[in-house]
Image (tube, helix red, strand yellow):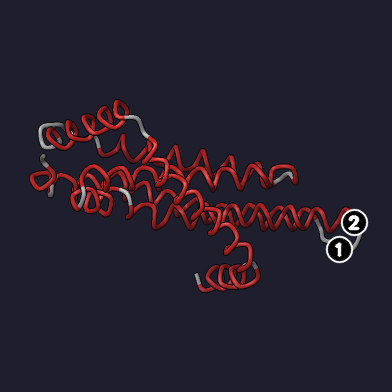
Amino acid sequence: MNYFSRILKDYFKRNIIKYIFLSLILISGIIAGSITVNFLSDIQSVNLQRYISGFLANVNDVSVDYSSIFFLSMSNNLKTAVLLILLGLSVIGIPFILAVILFRGFILGFTVAFLIEELGAKGLILSILSIFPQNLIILPCMISIGVTGLTFASTVIKNRTKRYQEDYRQVISGYMLLNLIFSFFLVISGLIEGYISPVFIKLFSNYFSL
């Protein structure tokens, strides 16, 4: 365990600039998503509000399939992770890695901003209970997988310019090992979204009722 923790710590130190860069991309997406809420039409806003209100009003009457939520969350997150990993294996995939990170931030920013815009303090609490817990793990993992892609691509570019030589098999092995670790944490985030967040929502459902 100490071996893996040392590997990750050293990896973070060597790639701090890339982490900062992708974090800024993510933040840009969050800001863009939150601003987009202001451009929703009245019909779109009303429809979304009705959907949320209906969900909160009936949350205690609905039988929650926690395992289905878990598997759906895990599947969606791992699909995104696999996409980032595949993009990272190609130099031309770098812009798409940035686009995926930006899009994840956009969705998060839009969702939280809409909840707060429509529900006020209730929306903030709902976001804290149902969105933030798993995203505290998901977003760092997505950024980390993106960083591995940028690092791998930069290694390929250096090799092609013959200014830097490294065994590709070793590089790919390290690339896959790191991404496997980050993907494991995505499974944990799925457990949180599937088995913990719904419990909190049910506990506070009376407060959420409009």
Cα gap from disc 1 to disc 2, whole angstroms: 7 Å
Q: Amino acid at mark 1?
A: Tyr
* Nearer the observer, 195 or 198: 198
| Position in image of residue 208 (x %, y %) | 13, 44
Instruction: Give the residue pinned by disc 1.
Output: 164
Quadrant where the C terminus lies? Answer: top left
Task: Specify whether residue 56 is in view.
Answer: yes
Q: How many marks?
A: 2
| SS at badge 2 | loop
Task: Say whether marks 1 and 2 touch (CB < 8 Å).
Answer: yes
Residue 195 in the image, given as x and y percentages of width and height: 26, 46
Left or right: 42 as drawn, with respect to 122: right
Q: Image point 43% across, 44% down: which residue?
A: 33
Amino acid type, mark 2: Thr
> Which callout, 1 or 2, points to the residue nearer the camera?
2
Give x and y (percent) for residue 163.
89, 63
As helix, strand or loop, the secondary structure at mark 1 comes to loop
**What is the number of the mark on residue 87?**
none
Query: In the image shown, does 128 or 73 lie closer to the viewer?
Result: 128
Q: Residue at x 31, y 42 (%)?
A: 114
Position of 124 with respect to 24 (left or right) is: left
Residue 99 spot, x, y in % from top left? 59, 43
Query: Would you call the spot at circle 2 few (<14 residues within 10 Å), some (14-19), or many (20 or more)?
Result: few
Residue beneath label 2, please? Answer: 161
Tell me what residue is drawn at x 57 percent, y 41 percent: 82
Residue 196 visible to an observer of this rendering: no
Extreme residue toward the left, this view: 206
Q: Between residue 169 and residue 197, name the one nearer to us.
A: 197
Q: Quadrant of residue 44?
A: top left
